[in-house]
Amino acid sequence: MKNTSFIFAVVWAVLALCTTSCEKSADNGFDLRLEKAGVNVPLNATETVRILSGNGGYRIKMDDKYKQYVEATISGTTVVLEGKAEGEAILFVYDAIGKSAKLQAVVQKNELRLSKTEVRFTATGTTATVEISGGTESYTVSTSDATVAQATVSGSTVSLTALRWGTATVTVTDVRTAQQQTIAVTVQEETLTFSLPAVELGVGGTQTLTITSGTASYTLSGFDRGVATATVSGTVISITGVATGTTTLTVTDSKKVKGDVPITIKE
């Protein structure tokens, strides 16, 4: 009987110890943990940090000197930080039983930049890309004339497509900071250039001019051989007057780029 009483006493002691230990564990609660101890916050934009564990009733404590840099609030189990001015802030997240976690926030302006601000097309249907850097990696694009140039964005790459001759302005916007940069788009047919804009000479006279752009070799076409004759050697064109009148000489290079030379033959 004494042994039985002793055994019951031991069991009750163990149960009491366990109960006390469990209550103490409950009183200690869960450690307060954040997904990161430091975060970069864009100026005039927001960044979030998740609370991974804790005991509810979350609140933020931050010295007044840091409030000029960042505004911090709690939304459920998320810390929401809004960048107010460039600088560094230290804040603490507390839960209902006083557990805490430190969070460092660095507010900085990340300038939105483009790899190029001008794009020129020399043929419709052709494409080009412009790379975005800076900002907050959330961008939209718009165009002032969608009939001239189409613009789309994927990640940090802007894709442009020339649709018709003309000009347009493509605007790239950082969604979170509202920063903007523009791309001037020109769709203009490429033409050959010459040392003379036009040729005027008399019947029997000869005039030479030089092709100053394009890619050799060159061919001549379109002119009225009853008014003038023309030959090309390298980049030099020789024109001879045959009879009074006017005509137009068309020069085409090896890449099919063309240019016109007006010709006038006088007596």
Image: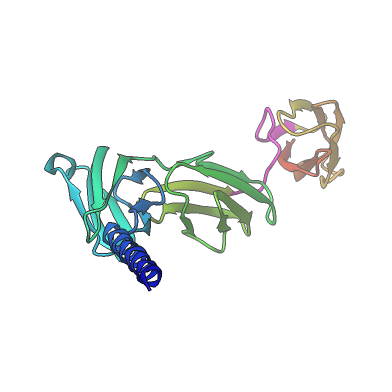
Task: Please check the rendered image and state whether residue 153 is part of the magenta-colored stretch, yes or no.
Answer: no
Q: Measured along the vertical axis of the image, is residue 106 above or below residue 5?
A: above
Q: Which of 255 and 228 is in front in this view?
A: 255
Instruction: Place residue 247 in its image quadrant.
Output: top right
Instruction: Place residue 225 in its image quadrant.
Output: top right
Q: Nearer the viewer, residue 55 or 219?
A: 55
Is 248 positioned to the left or the right of 154 in the image? right
Q: Residue at the left extreme?
A: 64
Q: Residue at the front extreme?
A: 1
Residue depicted at 52% across the width and 52% down the height: 167
Q: Where is residue 188 in the image (x, y as percent from the top left)?
A: 62, 48
Question: Which region is colored magenta?
Answer: 187-201
Q: Which of 93 and 206 is in front in this view?
A: 93
Is 180 positioned to the left or the right of 216 in the image? left
Q: Position of residue 65 (x, y in %)?
A: 14, 39
Asked if one can make out residue 220 in the rendered structure from this viewpoint, the answer is yes
- The C terminus - image quarter: top right
Determine the main secondary structure of the stretch shown in magenta: loop
Q: Position of residue 205 (x, y in %)?
A: 79, 27
Asked if one can make out residue 178 in the rendered structure from this viewpoint, the answer is no
The colour scheme applied to this rendered structure is: rainbow
